[in-house]
Image: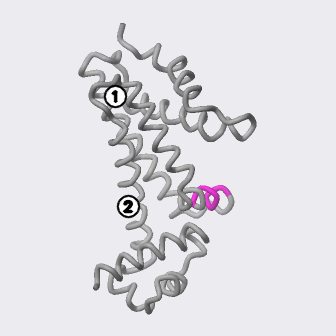
Amino acid sequence: MSLDRKTSILKAAEESFALFGYKATTMDQVARIANVGKGTIYTFFKNKEELFDDIIEKLIHQAKDIATTAIRPEDSFFDNLHRALYGILAFRKEHQLTIKLSQEVREIGTLPAKNALTKLEDAILHFIEGHIKTAMNKGELKTCDPAMTAFIMLKLYVALVFEWEQRHQPLEKEEIAHLFDLYLVKGLMKR
């Protein structure tokens, strides 16, 4: 019963954060949505920050699952990376919470929202960096700085998936893969 209530509270809080953002979400709102007393929330979470952190950890776990599922040992590093990045960014683009947090950061600059998005991005970068190191050890990639290369890869992907379509027709998945190959793969691939 206690686990059901905690799950209900987390679901209600995620809904509230996705609808209203971090700043405008209150424990009273979460209690109303979850149909529990406000005191019940405090039996599981010390404060709004702890509740928010729990939700962000779940979000990061979901993103990691998407990325991990995209990796196929028989495929090349770049095919795997493309599938993983595209999956993560599609998830981020469609997930209401990340959309609302991004909007809140742009419009208000709420620090906890900014920190949450940074934490998600850091998890993605860490995932990419680990796969870059593995690919270098296998001889699939030239020697490079894994942290910087992960950063460049992610930023290029974000630019192609999110930013390009703000001024142009959205790119298809295959077009993104081709551009990624053109600008990064050819330079990093070990010949």
On the image, which quarter does residue 190 sit in?
A: top left
How crowded pointer 1 is (Cα within 10 Å; few <14, some 14-19, many 20+) is rated as many
Q: As displayed, is residue 127 above or below residue 146?
A: below
Task: Say which amino acid is labelled 2.
Answer: Lys
Q: Which residue is mark 1?
A: 132
Q: Which residue is mark 2?
A: 58
- From the viewer's side, name the closer residue of 100 and 109: 100
- From the viewer's side, name the closer residue of 64 and 118: 64
Q: As displayed, is residue 61 above or below residue 3?
A: above
Observer-side mark, 1 or 2, equals: 2
- Magenta span main SS: helix
Q: As displayed, is residue 41 above or below residue 123?
A: below
Q: Decide if residue 56 is on the left or right side of residue 26.
A: left
Residue 142, magenta (yes or no): no
* Residue drawn at the location 38% of the way across and 61% of the way down: 58
Numbered disc 2: secondary structure: helix
Q: State which region is magenta.
A: 101-106
- From the viewer's side, name the closer residue of 83 and 21: 83
* Residue drawn at the location 34% of the way across and 42% of the way down: 69
Residue 185 image offset from top left, x and y in percent = 46, 18
Q: As displayed, is residue 24 above or below residue 67?
A: below
* Position of the C terminus by quadrant: top left
Task: Say which amino acid is labelled 1.
Answer: Ile
Whichever of labels 1 and 2 marks the residue nearer the N terminus, that label is: 2
* Residue drawn at the location 52% of the way across and 82% of the way down: 33
